Amino acid sequence: MREENETGHLPSNAQGDKGGKAVSDDQLASRRAMLRIGALSGAVVFTIRPGVAQAAASAIKCSVPVPQSSQAGKWIKNDGSVVKAGTKNAYAPPDAPLSGEDVKNSLNYGTRYSGYDQDETDAFNNYIKKLSSGKQGYTCYASIQSRTP
Amino acid sequence: MPRSRAVPPEILRITVSTVPPPLFTTDFPRLCLTREVDGLLLVFHRPSGATHFLENPAPEMLDLISGSPMTAEDLTDALCERFSLGADAEARTVIAARLAELLAVGLVRHC
Amino acid sequence: MYRFDVRIGHAGFRVGSPWRHPIDTLRRLYAGYPPPEGGGATLTARIAPPRPLRRWLRPQAAIAGDHCLPDVVPMALRHALLALEMAMNMQVALGERRHLLIHAAAVERGGKALILPGESGSGKSTLAALLGEAGWRVLADEFVLIDLATLRVRPFPRPISLKNDAIVEMQARVADESRFGPLLTGTPKGALRHLRPKADAIARMDESAVPALILFPAFGFPSDSAGVSRSELFARLTEGSTNYIALGQRGFETMLRIVDTTPAARFAYPDSAAGLAIVDQFCSEIGL
């Protein structure tokens, strides 16, 4: 736990995984992945800048799984519907949930999701726009929409 | 490094190739308040008054540099060793990019 | 110069205007509020014509005071009441140092505060107004003040800014016409009307409350809700705090304590009834 400082540490109820405790294989794998070029698409330093809208978007740590975890193994058709893997005009979904910031930027500014082309990005976005109450990622999508100026 | 217009090119080439790579230092965590939150490190950097969320490997990088000032190369070696990963060109490129981010916000500086 | 002095919570204001009408309107809107405490420091908030001729010719009101921001566009004189409110807001936003400011509305029940952060359009002001008519005490509409030492919410019960459809909705629920300010049309945010909190909220403006729940509303979607992680909570609350940076280390420590001790969630709602129902549900879950 990084709590050393000149004026004494702040009380914390968080459990850290540093300082002597063994790091799990998963954690090791993810640490190694951070030193690969692929990890460079995001920043590792997010600075608090009150009143700046862009910072607000970066602060959204919610994410949208594509598709629902109950639909694992399925693909996303270009119109956003969830279909059997290998279906024509359908694409393999992203392997991790899409971050709220990436979704906001894609919907508002047309950016593509890192590692995916335009067709795949469009398909994923059509899926997201079809999300309704009760579906995973819906409140994340709703809160992104409500923050658009 | 002083400008050397009158220096013959051979001498200049030798001088340039022996310029030592920059050393990085940090006042983390000494002059900071920190807290781990949701797997990120929240840092209040007292000298700048700025607050940052740091994602891995930034906290580890700062941890290593805080031990003693080091070059990007040494940092890469040390970090890769910590992660049981061979230090390669990819890792060096990523570390250089992350150092630039930390430099930009003043969490590391050249010494 | 026409003047109106008033105390709202901890802040005493000296409000000035070269035009008489806006000051008279402000005085009516703040009927029942106490004067500033004798000997206490007061914040100066003024409106003034951006150039001398603008006092009479297509008159405009620029906002000014102890603290000011360059580049704020002056408003037409018919919106002078809005300009006065903005001038008062600005003094708090830029000058407050004894409390951490959060951009949110807040209401109180049983000594506990429900905090509703959000930008314009999120519905926080309307929800606060509705809750204020349903047994809750309005603590704040725009700025929630967190005491740096005790973490308690210090009331700042200004008249609530209702916009567009919310105006009609609250007019239907509030019988006392005198609690409403004038209807302002054509403002940057559309139609706007102020609603003074109930007399009780004004009388108890020195009674603080413990923060118990933070709910981020998103108006205009089918009902849904989700938790908010501590990292997101920290980032979103600081994003909406005009004095977080100025408070330095104390700001950081106070915000961290809020985030450590106050549960937070977000919810979407299609209309007021649904919004109030979700708020009710959350509150009963945590005993608020």
Image (cartoon, coloured by chain):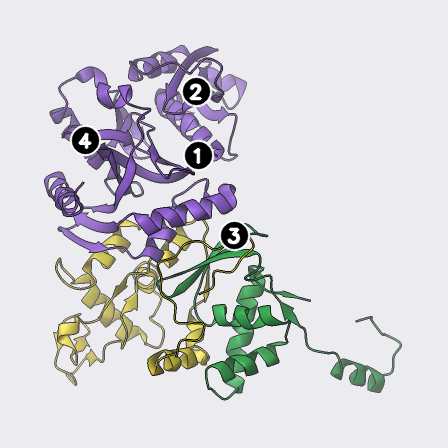
Residue hosting label 2: C13
Circles 1 and 3 on the same chain: no
Which residue is at 82% across, 70% downward?
B2
Q: Colour of chain C?
A: purple
Q: Colour of chain B?
A: green
Task: Using the image, determine if residue B35 lies above or below residue C111.
Answer: below
Which residue is at 45% across, 48% downward?
C252
Q: Classify mark 1: residues with Cα within 10 Å, few (<14), some (14-19) or many (20+).
A: some
- Total marks in image: 4
Which of the 4 image quarters holds residue A31? bottom left
Q: Classify mark 4: residues with Cα within 10 Å, few (<14), some (14-19) or many (20+).
A: some
Q: Classify mark 2: residues with Cα within 10 Å, few (<14), some (14-19) or many (20+).
A: many
Q: Amino acid at mark 3?
A: Ala
Residue hosting label 1: C93
Q: CA distance from mark 1 to mark 3?
A: 19 Å
Residue hosting label 4: C136
Q: CA distance from mark 4 to mark 3?
A: 37 Å
Q: Chain of mark 4?
A: C
Q: Amino acid at mark 1?
A: Ala
Q: Secondary structure at mark 2?
A: strand
Which image quarter is the N terminus of chain B in?
A: bottom right
Disc with the residue nearer the chain's start (4 vs 2): 2
